[in-house]
Amino acid sequence: MTILPQRALTRVEDLIEAGLAPADRADGLQQVAEAFRIRVSPEMQAAMIDADDAIARQFLPDTAELTIRPEELYDPIGDITYSPTPGLTHRYPDRVILAATHTCEVYCRFCFRREAVGEEGALPEADLEAALAYIAATPAIWEVILTGGDPLVLSPRRLSALMQRLSAIPHVEIVRFHTRVPVVAPARITDDMIAALRARPTTYLVLHTNHAQEITPAAQAALKRLADAGIPLLSQTVLLKGINDSAATLESLFRTLLRHRVTPYYLHHCDLARGTSHFRTTIAAGQAIMAQLRGRLSGIGLPTYVLDIPGGFGKVPIGPGYVEPTGDAYQITDWQGRRHAYRDPDAP
Ligand SMILES: *Cc1c(COP(=O)(O)O)cnc(C)c1O
Ligand code: SF4
């Protein structure tokens, strides 16, 4: 049994004291902290092997974050552009994103919502009422995606109240949670929390996780509780340079997830959030990794590699492509890179 540190680290002084940041960088790191909140949960502190490993790099501030490139955006995926009421984003007709809180258990250094998270806590009551009124008045909304922030930082009582409000809207059939909590703060996954999640309507949970090292024994137990409760579990992973940008690393993560009944859903190309260029790979690199994984890893372990098009145009799969039109046929590439001609038997 791991003995957990008592509290989350949220200040540069705490990090220096814990030996997780060099004292001679204090000034630069302080500047980073003023721009982007810091928080490393006790569980993630304990899971770090050293201050430069795959967990450390995700949560410890780095002066590289002070480099803001001209292409980087305050609102990289257009959450604000498509917001009908505060806290709500309605981009696709059938689903909305509801940011029920701006707080997280950890602040990821590459977060695409880094400008929006870390501020005040739960969405103000009046904004929540306005969001629920909009959802109730829009019959096309079939699914509500709770994100943030991290919705599982809310108390089971609060979540259960929110779930009851959503259940009362007949056209909302699915509620989906996007969360890091089962991994970064697994002790929050209590019986009460699970009961809150299981309130009708149908609940899906999408776990954000980027490296097998995060899936500690406590995280495994939390995933087991969720899966045993019958909640379908999916995952999303951000492709991050120096953290998980190799086929072997992702293979290990995806196999670990499958073993714990989590189906890999999306591999995100790293968004153009401000101060995150040191994490970003090229699309070509991401495609090469996905190509290596196909054939080498069970199909149920292969997520879709997606780009959220800057400006709010939505997510699209970005390959690699296996099909290329060649006049009256197609050239198809197999998992070993060999090419084959295929002609639709019924094509004109
Ligand atoms: C990512 C996102 C969704 C969910 O997209 P899926 O492809 O259904 O997972 C919905 N709305 C917005 C605004 C999003 O950014
Ligand atoms: S937990 Fe999610 S929302 Fe919060 S900082 Fe990390 S990526 Fe961003």
Image (cartoon, helix red, strand yellow):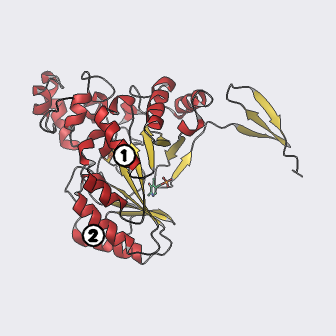
Residue lying at 56% horizontally and 39% vertically, measured from the top left: 300
Q: Quadrant of residue 147?
A: bottom left
On screen, residue 287 above or below 325: above
Residue lying at 22% horizontally and 62% vertically, measured from the top left: 157
Residue 56: numbered disc? none
Describe the element under mark 1 as helix, strand or loop. loop
Foreground residue among 194 and 207: 194
Judge whether residue 333 can be spotted in this image.
Answer: yes
On screen, residue 151 above or below 285: below
CA–CA distance between discs 1 and 2? 22 Å
Q: Is mark 2 within 8 Å of ligand 1?
A: no
- Identify the amino acid type marked 2: Asp
Q: Position of residue 90 (x, y in %)?
A: 44, 64
Foreground residue among 327 and 190: 190
Which residue carries the number 1 mark? Answer: 112
Say few, some or many: other residues with alpha carbon within 10 Å of mark 2 (under 14 / 14 to 19 / 20 or more). Answer: some
Q: Position of residue 8 (x, y in %)?
A: 16, 39
Which residue carries the number 2 mark? Answer: 127
Judge whether residue 275 can be spotted in this image.
Answer: no
Quarter of the image with the N terminus in it: top left
Relative to 147, 284 lies left or right: right
Q: Is mark 1 within 8 Å of ligand 2?
A: yes
- Identify the amino acid type marked 1: Phe
